[in-house]
Amino acid sequence: IMPAGPSVAVPAPAARPAAPPVQRAAEYIVALVNSEPITNTQVQKRVQRVLDEAGPQAAGVPRDVLTRDVLEQLISERAQLQLAKEQGMRLDSMAVEQAEQTVARQNELSLTALYQRLSEAGISRDEFRNNIRDQLMLTRLRERELDSRVRVSEREIDDFLAEQRGTRPRAAA
C-alpha cells in the first residue's frame, strides 16, 4: 500500500498587516544530534509553522511547551534522517518532483501557484523541496522498519475476518 504522499501544509493566502520591525536574537545552537546542530532559528521557524497550521487551536498551548515539543520533534527527525543516511537510503529528484505535484494537486493549485504561495509565506523553493525530501525519507524509513517487524499469518487474517463477520473462527487443527 503506497502512502498518499507527504503531509505538507501549504499556507493559505492571507492579507496580513505589515509586521512591525522585530529585533532578532543572535543565532545559536540549541541541540546537537550526533554532532549535527539544530539552531534556534530552525526551532523558531518550525514553531511558527505549527502556529500557522494549527490556527486558533495552538493559542491555548504555552509557547515554552510548544517550543520544547518542536525541539524534541526536530531532534527525533534529525536522528531518523541520519539513520536513513547510514542505511544508504536515497531519494531521486523524480520522487521529490512527484511529491511536489501531489502537494499542488491536493491544494488545487498549479505548481507555479504553489511556489508563489510558498514565496508569499517566506518559504523558498529549496526549503520546500528539502522539507519534502526529509518527509519522504522519514516515511520510507518508518515503512522499512515496520515491514521488517510486522508479520501477520494467514490464520490471523482468517480469524480477524471471521470476527468482523460475526462468526467464530474454526478451531486449530
Image (cartoon, rainbow, N blue to C red):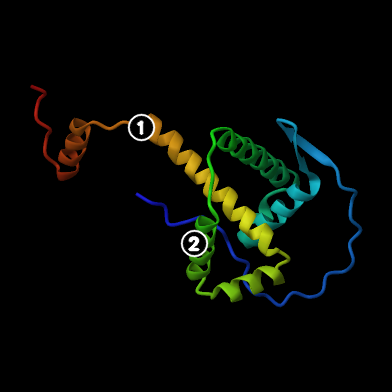
Q: Quadrant of residue 80?
A: top right
Q: Nearer the viewer, mark 2 or mark 1?
A: 2
Q: Position of residue 26 (x, y in %)?
A: 90, 48
- Residues under numbered marks 2 and 1 in contact, where contact means CB atoms less than 8 Å apart: no
* Horizontal relation, residue 161 to residue 123: left or right: left
Q: Secondary structure at mark 2?
A: helix
Give the mark nearer the N terminus: 2 vs 1.
Answer: 2
**Residue underneath mark 1:** 150
Asked if residue 117 shows in the view, the reply is yes
Label 2, on which residue?
Answer: 98
| Residue 88 x, y percent position in the rendering | 54, 36
Front residue of 150 and 56: 150
Q: Residue at x 79, y 44 (%)?
A: 39
Q: Residue at x 75, y 49 (%)?
A: 42
Position of residue 4 measured from the top left corner of the image (x, y, whole percent): 42, 57
* 87 relative to 156 in the view: left or right: right
Residue type beneath disc 2: Gln
Residue at the spot x=54%, y=33% of the render? Answer: 87
In which quadrant is the C terminus drawn? top left
Is residue 7 visible in this depiction of the protein?
no
Secondary element under disc 1, as helix, strand or loop, is loop
Left or right of residue 23: residue 11: left
Which of the 4 quarters of the picture holds residue 72? top right
Question: Counting other residues with Cα less than 10 Å from the Cα at mark 2, is it few (<14), some (14-19), or many (20 or more)?
Answer: few
Q: Residue at x 67, y 53 (%)?
A: 60
**What kind of residue is marked 1?**
Val
